[in-house]
Amino acid sequence: MKNVFGLIISKTVMKKQKYMTSVDKLLSALGEDLKLEKNDWSENFAFHGVGNAYSKRWMADILPVELLKLSVKDAVNIIATLSEGGIFYERFPENVETPNYGDNWGRLANYIEINDRAIATMDNGCTCSGILSCIKLLPAIPPSAKSWANCIILSQIWPNIFGDAYEKGPYEENSIYGIRLNTSYSDNIIDYSIVDKISPEEQLKTFNDLAHFRGIKTGFRHVISADQMKIVKPYEDDITFNWCNPEHVEIYINECVKLMNLGFECMFIDSAKHIGGYDCEHYDGVGDLPEYPQMQYILNEIRSRTGNTHISFVGEKSSDDFERYRLMGLTAGTDFITGDDFYAVRELSEKMKYNRTYAPGVQITNDNYCGGLSYEQILNRINSALFGFYLASDKLPSFMQMSDLFPLRYDTNTHHLMMTNPSYSTDGTAESHYENLFTKDDGRAYNKKVGELFAYALNL
């Protein structure tokens, strides 16, 4: 009887685990109850889309700390409460699918880069669990519009080579622009204290599932400059990446495929403009780049091996030679027009409307932004990006940073946080870092204005 009873128990446990969603697994790993509860705060104060987009809701007129200080369970409760379908799920639903905007969704999308390392938990000189902070921030990211998607780009996924998982001084190098491949994911991002209960891959998948539930697509940034990449070998020193080494290229492809299979749908490729030796007098990276036909092969292989025809490949910077990028396999390119001139954006949209698979983008700010723009100028650029067209179906892609939604404190900037990893805590707690990383009252007022712009755009 004991053996039989043990077998019955085992089958029961297996059956229960079979139907646990990624969200269930994360909540269970954190010691939380799996039953979700409505969150009155978010229900009462959420922004709504205008007109027919009224069911699209998110948190605006807020400071990031108001969400980042919450537990993951609180964040999931808010995400469930803001369900666009108006259905409240007491258990997170199975089989959440990405919002469907067709294979060429990336040609129209708004890309919002979130520095997941900057909002990670900083404790006793260590940095961790950035993906959990991204989950907490999800309710404050506007959902996708009727005609186009919003896509979150995570600044870091893989370990960086300058001191991963360590907080450093405000001016000590700890750049995200250097990655280690053929190993796990960054200690800055993953909560490794719970990996015996939920793997790093499942933690990333949980973020993607929750983003998709919010009606948001996801992607990741990475560099392709050979001397800024390392290949990890067991029991050996790291090896500098070499684009002429077939083994290294295969590792690179497989690493990207693994992330796509976890639910990411976009790759933001640093220095993509210079692939194949193009315009290299303005190339700021370190080391060789892939050849043009090689990158065509790589992007095609990623699509082929994932079976995913709707991956968006975004290239940093673009030029007038749009066919060069389209034929490479890219979907969008950054840094072509700033959005300062609304009418110039609208005319470029009109010029590009017949190209349905690639377009240059409107740039609000980029990862190299060192400050200097007024709130009014940034709001004007967002307005141009969201409304600079004659028809919504002809919209250009746009690119913005975390600080374009949530302004950073005055003595730091986007690029500084990409290059360094300081804590701004005044008492040693993670919550104090969150509170002091961003501006306060004026940041809240600015965030409200951004929310008002998105509210009208969501109906288009």
Image (tube, grey):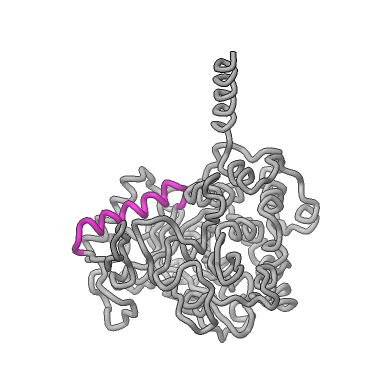
- The count of marks equals 0
Q: Which of the pair 380/278 is nearer the observer?
A: 278
Farthest front residue in view: 2
Q: In this rendering, would 175 be left or right of 227?
A: right
Q: Which of the pair 177/108 is nearer the observer?
A: 177
Residue range corresponding to the magenta coloring = 244-264
Give coordinates of residue 343: x percent, y percent.
Answer: 52, 75
Q: Residue at x 51, y 52 (%)?
A: 204
Whether 289 is among the magenta residues is: no
- Quarter in which the N terminus is drawn: top right
Whether 259 is among the magenta residues is: yes
Q: In this rendering, would 447 be left or right of 285?
A: right
Give coordinates of residue 367: x percent, y percent.
Answer: 47, 74
Asked if residue 306 is positioned above or below residue 248 in the image, the reply reads: above
Q: Which of the pair 351/87 is nearer the observer?
A: 87
Give coordinates of residue 171: x percent, y percent.
Answer: 51, 84
Q: Residue at x 36, y 72 (%)?
A: 318
The majority secondary structure of the magenta stretch comes to: helix
**Residue 129 at least partly seen:** yes
